[in-house]
Amino acid sequence: MQLRIMSFRCVLLLIAAAAATTANAHNVTHMLAKHPDFSTFNHYLTTTHLADEINRRRTITVCAVDNAAMNELLSKHYSLYTLKNILSLHVFADYFGAKKLHQITKSSTTTSSLFQATGEADGTSGYVNITDMKGGRVGFTPVDSDADQPMATFVKSIEELPYDIAVIQISHILSSPEAEAPTAGPGDTNLTVLMARQGCKAFSDLITADGAADTFAQSVEGGLTIFCPSDEALAAFAPTYKNLTADGKTSILLYHGVPIYYSLGMLRSSNGLMNTLATEGAKKYDFTVQNDGNEVKLKTKIVTAAIKGTLINEDPLAVYKIDKVLLPKELFKAAPPAPAPKPAKSAKAKAAKGDDDADSPGPAGDDSAAADEESSNDGGGRFAGSGGFVTVCFCLLFGILTL
């Protein structure tokens, strides 16, 4: 009876461990919702989809400003897309809690913001200088700003999950000429120009020549996600593309468009089949979205591609750069499965046949080691993070049994 009770307690502890691991994921909107003074800043993090980007990152710092500072920013009547660039300067791709801010090596450091990380900024734009000033003050200034003095100073820590996320308050809005530059909305975006400027010129040229660019442009208003192969990926695919029929060329280009808007955060939580602009009747032309850690992968029956960059992510349009051309099974044959390996001869069988290498280790030994390794990997993945709890359970059980 005692053994059953202890086993039940061990199960409960393992469930608690799994719940604790899940709870470690942060949600910046929930954090700021507890602080009404930052409600406007919190609202625009959600509206601009920056909240999704913040929540998916493991190490991040959010420099929030209060409602008064946000009202001053909003009085300048920037477009939503320009506001996103400005607010992106307030999100650092590193952890800076209150303690770390006051212990900066050599009193100054430079960190990248989401404005730089998303590829919206050129050159040094998007980097922010952090300076530990005299009197315990900490200042923040965008690198490309003309300001002689820090543009904003540290006010207080709002919430911190050490080394994962720090939400701090700064005194004023951070901005720069690059961030304030007018930004067109998705409806005004010239897709082919956008692609050509950001490493997808070859794909841009193909959809323009084929006429598929018009289909993409007409689909934006209702929601559109484009997966654009990089120039390097298309260079390798060019000979194959030339041999396709006219209909085949159009189909493979439209295969890279999904008639729904998906932010990167949405893709990370939307594993499964997706229809494309090429889908028509019995011609499925679909592929599977599958997450691999923080990386989003697109799997067809022929090839697996990964998202390597974001060209634009503004509802209702998202364009992502991928490292391979997506190949639909409707146009390309899947590679045949590899033949199963022949069973290895045992040492006794070899000896019976008079084989010279009867005593030498054969493939069977390698297969056994591989099986052991696979078993170890499966176990490690299944119970990772709960080994400590299992040990505690066995120790408790041993102690009670010896009473």
Image (tube, helix red, strand yellow):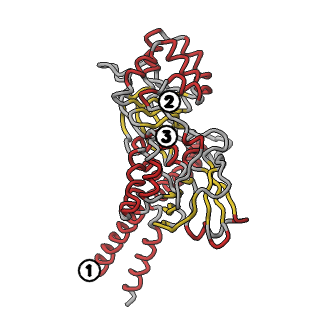
**Label 1 CA crowd tier, 10 Å (few <14, some 14–19, many 20+):** few
Above or below for 91 versus 334: below
Q: Is disc 3 placed on a helix, strand or loop?
A: helix
Residue 65 - label: none
Disc 1 marks a residue whose amino acid type is: Met
Disc ID at residue 303: 2
Q: Quadrant of residue 40?
A: bottom left
Mark linked to residue 1? 1
Residue 82 - label: 3
The amino acid at mark 3 is Thr
Q: Earlier in the sequence, mark 2 or mark 3?
A: 3
State the residue lying farthest toward the left. Answer: 1
Q: Earlier in the sequence, mark 1 or mark 3?
A: 1
Please provide percent x and percent y for residue 83: 47, 44
| Residue type at the position of mark 2 | Val
Please give the name of the residue rendered at 36% of the width and 34% of the height, measured from the top-left corner.
273
In space, the residues marked 2 and 1 are separated at their CA atoms by 55 Å
**Image check: 390 left or right of 60?**
left
**What's the CA distance linking mark 2 and mark 3?**
37 Å
The residue sitting at 54% across, 23% down in the picture is 193
Residue 131: percent from the left, percent from the top? 66, 62
